């Protein structure tokens, strides 16, 4: 994965997105050497709505899995405190 500075992105606003689109490259945008954004090619045939739908479906699945393993009567606060004591 290539890094591109924010300044370079500003200078090459036309060519950088073209490179991502045509070559399928993924880029990390940096500001003063610190990664701040990730540019990836759009998935063909997928709309943003479909992507969000799949993300929410995965979140629901994870919530159900956590719910099955969660102790009855335990609060989130208690679980976090317990985890911190174990570290």
Image (spheres, rainbow, N blue to C red):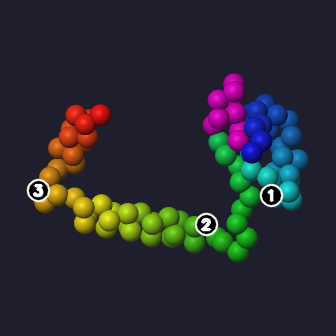
x and y percent of residue 58 in the render? 45, 66
- What is the number of callouts on the image? 3
User: Which numbered disc flags the more N-terminal residue, 2 or 1?
Assistant: 1
x and y percent of residue 55 in the render? 50, 64
Q: Quadrant of the C terminus?
A: top left
User: Which numbered disc flags the more N-terminal residue, 1 or 3?
Assistant: 1
Q: Quadrant of residue 8?
A: top right
Q: Please give left or right for residue 74 compared with residue 6 in the image.
A: left
Residue 34 circle label: none
At horizontal 11% and vertical 56% (from top left) the residue drawn is 73
Helix, strand or loop under label 1: loop
Q: Which residue is mark 2?
A: 48
At horizontal 85% and vertical 57% (from top left) the residue drawn is 23
Q: Which residue is mark 1?
A: 24
| Secondary structure, magenta segment, majority class | strand
Q: What's the CA distance linking mark 3 and mark 2?
A: 38 Å
Helix, strand or loop under label 3: loop
| Magenta region | 28-36
Helix, strand or loop under label 2: helix
Residue 33 colored magenta?
yes
Q: What's the CA distance linking mark 1 and mark 3?
A: 49 Å
x and y percent of residue 52 in the render? 53, 65
Outermost residue on the bottom side: it is: 45
Outermost residue on the front side: it is: 86
Q: In the image, which is nearer the foreground, mark 3 or mark 2?
A: 3
- Label 2 neighbour load within 10 Å: few <14, some 14-19, many 20+: few
Q: What's the CA distance linking mark 2 and mark 1?
A: 18 Å
Q: Please give left or right for residue 51 compared with residue 6 in the image.
A: left
Q: Which residue is mark 3?
A: 73
């Amino acid at each position: 994965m290539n890094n591109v500075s924010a300044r370079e992105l500003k200078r090459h606003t036309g060519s950088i997105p073209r490179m991502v689109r045509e070559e399928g490259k993924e880029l990390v945008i940096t500001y003063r050497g610190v990664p701040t954004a990730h540019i990836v090619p759009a998935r063909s045939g997928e709309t943003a709505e479909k992507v969000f739908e799949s993300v929410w479906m995965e979140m629901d699945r994870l919530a159900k899995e956590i719910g099955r393993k969660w102790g009855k009567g335990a609060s989130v606060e208690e679980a976090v405190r317990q985890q911190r004591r174990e570290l």
